[in-house]
Image: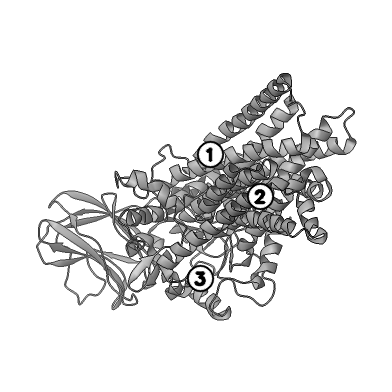
Amino acid sequence: MTKADQEAERGARRRFWRAAAIGGLLALPVFYWMVNGGQLNPFHAEPFSGFYDAQAHSLLDLHWDVPAKDVTFEGFRIDGKTYLYYGPVPAVLRMPVLAITDSLDGKLTQVSMLAAFAVALVFVSRLSWRIRRLVRGDAPVSRLEMLSVGGYVFLIATGSVVFFLASRTLVYHETELWGAALALAAYDAILGFLTEPSRRWVLLAGLWGTLAFLTRASVGAGPLVALAIVLVVVVLRRLRTRRLDAPGRWLAVPEGAGTNAMIGWIAAAIVVPVVLYAYVNYSRFGSFFGLPIEKQVYSGFNLARKRALADNGGSLFGLKFLPTQLLQFLRPDALRLDGLFPWIKFPGPATVVGDVTFDTRDWTSSIPATMPALTLLGLGGVVVLVRRAGAAVLRAPFIAALAGALGMLTIAFVANRYMSDALPAIVLASLVGLHVLLAALSRTPRPNWARFAGVAVVVLAVVSLWVNFALAITYQRALDPASSAIRTGFVGFQQDVDDRLPGGPRGSARVGVELPEHGSLGDLFVLGNCGGLYWSDSRVWFPLERGEGAGHFRLRVRFRPVTGVQEPLLSLGSGAEQNVLSVTYVQGGKARFALDSPVAPRTLVSRSVTITPGRPYALDVVLDSRSGQVLVKLGGDTVLDAITFLVSGDRATIGATSDPADPARFSGTIQELPVRTPLCDFVRSRYGVGSSS
């Protein structure tokens, strides 16, 4: 290559990387907004986001078990200790921070996911450059290609399952994102080795593959399979058998990969992650590769889990789940139109194929429905991979990436986030399709099929962006919000948007004195005269606003504590069949709140809180017999929050029990305040539903 050619290549690479960087930088604030739930604070805490922090602290103390209270029902109880099953890499990445301070416990998930997002985009860009060189050689980088490359990176970031993972900062989504990002890095190194064999690329492939495998074994197994394919090919070549050498030629494994030294390094890159995984698994569960799912806390009390284990021979893994998973993730119609913002929603539960029992069928769409542009490019890329010799070096990584996606298809869970296991295969195939299309569009005259395909990809890319935004925002704000207040705010926003559009109201709202057994996704139900407003996800009715008719009471209270005395604050029901909220005064100017119900398995008791005699306090109480919600806030501070069984009834007795024979009375002053339900009033007015008594 002449000096002029080298300079031309450097210039092309700079333009290419500039375009990719612009696409990533444009996507960054969008991803940041979603992963932080619209907040500006990247260190805010959410439920189910502190598991890796607990694991990091235990590793700093040189043991694998974690505090049971920190991991709730996800923990595995073995010999009196609690363990996590998640790969340790995201926990290890936290250790330098948590070794210095524990003030960020439970607050690092957003930062971790932003880091994984950046890693993923960097290696998507690197893979794009590698695949371009394989497909197009040293063709100049045109303005159209720069726009396309930047647009592709932006599409991966905000128009694919990557953006859905940003919908919640849960341990599950963090694991998926890191697993996919590290697997993409491993495939980049593997392609580097296949195009120019060297020990450096094998070491990088082994490093990234190890990290991916120790983060999420399913997607992380793909790079190990790719290395294993290469190892088998070079060993077959050593046999000098023409018939056995044919797979090597089809897979385009270079001759330089077959030296004695390279064979040893490739074998080590496969063995090391497997041995490390076996060590971690054995340290936790006493098994090299097995997962004692029956010892998970969740398996001990959840009825759906117990049924799934009983019906599937004590296991949640198997090829029998494959037909259902394939149908769900490959069907093109896995979306539904909706009358309310964002006008697209998830379909119903996945259709079960065969006589199998699933543990969970979460809200799930499909690859072609959520990523139609990438699907179209990927289908074209697969054709090229099979038929064009110039792309042969990509065959082994692509086959391995498909194998890595197989893990998600053989488990008794259906979830939208699992599409991330297929992301490396989608990226590899769609990048081939993209650069083949760009090559065709650069010809003069441009083929008609290329013009049509280019327009189709652009249109489908716009569709992909909106679909993934719609599903992510709905999941984050309505289907699985961090708090009920987020759901209420989102539904209110939907109603505000719909109210400003002509032709409304859209959606469905009903009124009655008892909640229906079922509702459709997005249905609203007004309880009585706005005694409460409920929203349905088609499975459960969730309260948006509670008035007195739904067990919500606002009180202004002045305490006159007498140590050791228990006094009633509020009761719901009559006679012996009543729920009673009481306060008990303890030493040190403190008090505890307790909820007794004749149908509850135990008395709920709050932590001790400091009270000042004679000072007025706002006491916010929820005793919702329909959902079992018990919530007590004193001056805005939550002192009791639980789910239990409650006696039905909405009529309250303030400052006493409803039993005339019970002389107990609240000795301070207590005043009931009105409970406002503005969203319920707005809904009732918009939909024209009157009160029902």
Q: Earlier in the sequence, mark 1 or mark 3?
A: 1
Quadrant of the rendered image containing residue 411: bottom right
The residue tagged with tag 2: helix, strand or loop?
loop
**Residue with the mark numbered 1:** 118
- How far is disc 2 from disc 1 in space, using C-alphas? 36 Å
Position in image of residue 151 (x %, y %) = 67, 34
Identify residue type, mark 2.
Answer: Thr
Residue 157 vs 506, above or below: the answer is: above
Identify residue type, mark 3.
Answer: Gly
Q: Nearer the viewer, residue 487 or 531?
A: 487
Identify residue type, mark 1.
Answer: Ala
Position in image of residue 264 (x %, y %) = 59, 54
- Residue under the point 73% across and 35% down: 133
- Residue under the point 47% across and 40% down: 38
Q: Nearer the viewer, residue 202 or 167?
A: 202
Q: Earlier in the sequence, mark 2 or mark 3?
A: 2
**Viewer can see residue 47:** no
Query: On the rendered structure, is 490 left or right of 332?
Result: left
**Residue with the mark numbered 2:** 259
Q: Nearer the viewer, residue 476 or 131?
A: 131
Residue 45 vs 562, above or below: the answer is: above
Q: Earlier in the sequence, mark 2 or mark 1?
A: 1
**Residue with the mark numbered 3:** 290
Position in image of residue 209 (x %, y %) = 56, 51
Q: Nearer the viewer, mark 1 or mark 3?
A: 3
**Viewer can see residue 447:** yes
